[in-house]
Amino acid sequence: MSDTVEREVGRARPRKEDARLVTGQTNWTDNIAVNGLLHLAILRSPMAHARIDHVNVTPALERPGVVAAFSGADLAEGLGSLPCAWPVTEDIVLPDHPPIATTEVRYAGDPVAVVVARDRYAAADALEAIEVDYTPLPPVLDLEAALAEDTVLVHSDKGTNRCYDWPLKTGEDFESVRQRADVTLKRRYHQQRLIPNAMEPRGVVVTPLAASGEYTLHSSTQIPHILRIMLAVVTGIPEHKLRVIAPDVGGGFGSKLQVYGEEAIALAVARRTGRPVKWTESRSEGYLATHHGRGMIQDIEIAANRDGTLLGLKVDLLVDMGAYLMLVTPGIPILGAFMYPGIYKMGSYELNVTGVFTTRTPTDAYRGAGRPEATYAIERIMDELAAELGLDPVELRRRNWIGHEEFPYTTIAGLTYDSGNYEAATEKALALFDYDKLRAEQADRNHRGDSVRLGLGVSTYTEMCGLAPSRVLRDLRYAAGGWEAATIRMLPTGKVEVVTGTSPHGQGHVTCWSQIAADVLGVPFEDVEVVHGDTQAAPQGMDTYGSRSLVVGGTAVHHAAVKVVEKARKIAAHLLEASEQDLEFTDGVFSVKGSPDARKTIQEVAFETFTSHDLPDGLVPTINAEHLVDPDNFSYPHGTHLCAVEVDTETGQTRIRSYVCVDDVGRVVNPLIVEGQVHGGLAQGIAQALYEEAVYDDQGNLVSGTMADYLVPSAPDLPEFTTDRTETPATSNPLGVKGVGEAGTIASTPAVVNAIVDALRPLGVRDVRMPCTPERVWQAVREASR
Amino acid sequence: MIPPAFEYARPADVDEAVRALADAGEEAKVLAGGQSLLPLLRLRLAFPELVVDVGRIAELRGVREDGDSLVIGAMTTHHDVIRDPLVRRHAGLLAAATATVADPAVRHRGTLGGSLAHADPAGDLPAVVLAMDGELVAQGPAGRRTIPARQFFVDYLQSALEPDELLVEVRLPKTDGWGFHYEKFHRVAQAWAIVGVAALVRRDNGRVAEARVGLTNMGTTPLRATATEEALAGAGDADAVARAAESAAVATQPSRDTSASPEYRAHLARVLAKRAVLAAAGMG
Amino acid sequence: MTRVSVKVDGTNYEDEVEPRLLLIHYLRDRLGLTGTPVGCDTSNCGACTVDLDGESVKSCSVLAVQADGGEVTTVQGLAGEDGEWTGLQRAFHERHALQCGYCTPGMIMAARDLLRDNPTPTSDEVRHALEGNLCRCTGYQNIVRAVLAASGQEVGT
């Protein structure tokens, strides 16, 4: 690496993105105003499962300001099924998924009819005039009962609620391992459904140009590029006539990694009416209509020797697909399938994933997507095994993790972890946490029989991210590739445009990509602008999810910038009348070795290509460059998280007293942003452990249906975090970077629950189901003491 | 997110407000601070034909003394209640409990009278006013009447106010010399109380001379833990208080929701009653 | 329709509005002041927090007609005439107290209200003052640091 590369990368740059955001000069989808704009409102099923007998939209048409109203049947022509891009097995059951229901509703919130009116008030009023007759059908809610013979079917034409079975079996047969193991433990864990809760509710604006058949669709999406392709297929609008823009997008966490019915409906309605159409969900509507995350039952069995050496792992997952398969619904548990062995060495691994249809909102990606579930199960059962063996939970991990000298290491699940240092991260975390002192205090409280118990929880996680090598995706039957694109345009005045295929929604790509490009090009950070999120302005990309943007997209920016320099070198050599080999490039300046006065800046070279007055024969007059990166491996961040909780055994209330994490996300481009990603990840992981759950009643109604019932924590509900890092560079990309977007969420949930169980273990408690509400904790203590 | 349409009146004084309510009959809703009504309207859980905005009626705001009582205008905001020197001096329990209501922005708009008239048993202030033996003064076409708090809260979201009556003021006996504490138990800071306990304790020679205990969210109305109050008389130490608190859930009918079962609420009432009384009595 | 007269970020407006029109929709849809967003329908998220007559309010929980005669300040009205940011805006930027930025207008308005009341709050006081404002990105830690920094207090990194 030259000196220039260290200049910006690694620097805690406050973000370029902030200027507009702190002053309110934003461009959220709902802000968009267009002449003649109509507001779309959607009538949704109030029942989990019912036959639609009759829909009458005529009364709505009579309401003031209403321009049009449509039932599902009215819109069916010209709207195909919403896509599932990840049919994980050959014989997966793939039900039809109309963007708006025509004959049957399959979850509370399934769209049934729509109106468009001159403003949002008129649209909301008109919705109430639509008449729908339903014949209620029984809901399908219990994952195990859904698989029984002769049960109610979510999709009666499919003959089963079993969506797929996906097995994985490596190493020694688990049955033989179980036979010879000193200890086997089997546990069942529940991953409750979560609602992602990006702060910006979803919205869509479609602007049609009737004369030319062109459509511009603004959507609060993470995936403008994928969305364009998919919506072209769903609506029949030719891809080249459809422009998709992700304007300012207020968070996603996976929930905007989707092709939503509302996007297709808005296109269909704009096509029908010839008018621009806007739809913005209300928060409560979004709780029904925006996909949920998690939702699975995990049966996990671990086999070990008396000394703690792990022998093998067997995992059975029952996963709630919800009513339909959305973009990557079936693939979410598969992203976790390779992570159950975590950072540990073992000789046997068996897993089976069973996808199950229910009459609930579909599930799909939510921060971590499969990997938090896997990490939870292995890290929880490691604590149980430690207790069984009378070992400190950190010591048990130490006896089994991959040593730093063993990298690259191919795990029992078949992944090759390129780099890591679990010892270093753990030692640093233990010191920051003051582990031994807290253990002493815990012993003292236990001895005194204090009603407020102290518990310490550890989680030593890794995860696979930086999605993804295209060939691996092919093997997993994912329909697209995992590459990412970047283009660098050197403008005549010396400024730089980086065009990226990633689509940020809070991450800080503009700042980080500027840092990467500035270093390679040797131009000022301020002179770089980043163009993104518009299929016209940034036409090629695979968008943002799975902690991929820096690892794949940032790498593409780096390579494109290197290409720019190489192209510029040819021209600089010509201008300086030197050979390319005699040129040095430092801090944005080409100079001739040995004659330091012979210099050309890269900006000067850019201007020379603009005028093209003096370029060598046959040279294409541009130093702009593009690059596509297809990663050859995943990225494997890791770290050690430690949580101390105080549990009030009288009320069951848990308070996090301290939280320490040491993450290794490889080389860091911007420490401010990395720390922010970790903080936010921790908050969401802790929220799963303590607060959040999408609760359904026995009729399939979402009971936690508003933000007043679904408990997103606010500032007083979360502790101060102590975060630190180790840096073990990734070897799979030139920047040495690993993903950071999901790490905090993946790691923190088991750390918190392990701490709660650790606090209550002396009282006989062995598990508390998430979220660990005060009542559940109180009940666990009560039952254990019986 | 879109309220249904309604007619709107903004009376200048109480008489005008009462006339507007009387003319509209059952279909009118009073808009005080709007922090309960507007959420109901936004979710279309209420469809009033007329909204009577009493926000500009100056006589409904403010705190004054009236002998042994404190008189608080119904439209006094939570924010003002918390900071009012008279409330802090003579009705500390109300100030303490009001500080736990919702969040600062809501407390800027929300009013004491609005919270009480809404009669939500999960609200913090009904149990407090009940524990303080407060009185609520309503004005209707026939004039004013005073309703003891014990009779004011009729059922879930239902008060003793007639459709043509406006709550104008809240009268609280001064509790100078009483210890007080509001123990609120919730899962996250901005959530409603799963259970709350409002305790007032008057001590004599280190013993509890008199105690009043109000319960939030232990039934369809705020309740008094009468059995505990009786058992507290004469309690001289923490054990005695704990024993008295064991009966805090007697004669309650707590509900079931996503945060708690009735059984757990009953348990919490006992634990929180103990803590609230100990804190109020300075024995904690 | 009811007539309202409101001063918003220094500009006087007079409009005929439906009584049911929420202040937030008046600001966004009628005045085009889209800097203040909507994040929920239950008063929980605080994204729509503005200042009304010197106090923070959730503009989803105020009717436009209730603001009649009043003065509203939104995040768009904070910067000076020369565009100079307030201390809170600077601190949010410098301390990386925002990611997606959707909650930021509300957070800044709520924090501004706190500092007016309590110029040197503790970290706990900041957290409680912001309890009605939800952020899904930051875990709040940098927001708390930013508010403390804006109050002129020393803050660790």
Image (cartoon, coloured by chain):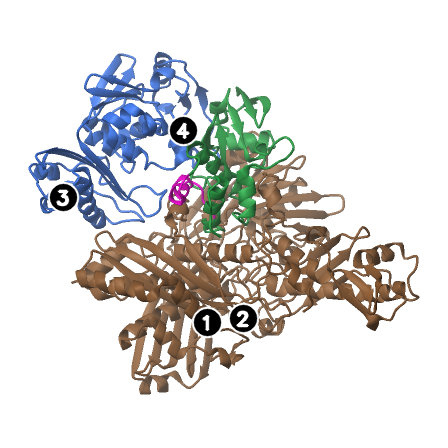
Counting residues from the start of the chain, the first of labels 1 and 2 encountered is 1
Could you tell which of marks 4 and 3 lies nearer the N-terminus? 4
Give the spatial CA distance, label 4 vs label 3. Answer: 35 Å
Residue at image mark 2: A728
How many numbered callouts?
Answer: 4
Asked whether disc 1 touches disc 2, contact meaning CB atoms under 8 Å apart, the reply is: yes
Q: Secondary structure at mark 4?
A: helix
Expressed as whole percent of the image width and height from the top left, the position of residue A574 reads: 89, 65
What's under tag 3, amino acid-wise? Ala
Image chain in green: C
Label 2 chain ID: A
Magenta region, residue range: C121-135
Note the chain letter of the brown one: A
- The image quadrant of residue A772 is bottom left
**Drawn colour of chain B?**
blue
Neighbor class of circle 2 (other Cα within 10 Å; few <14, some 14-19, many 20+) is many
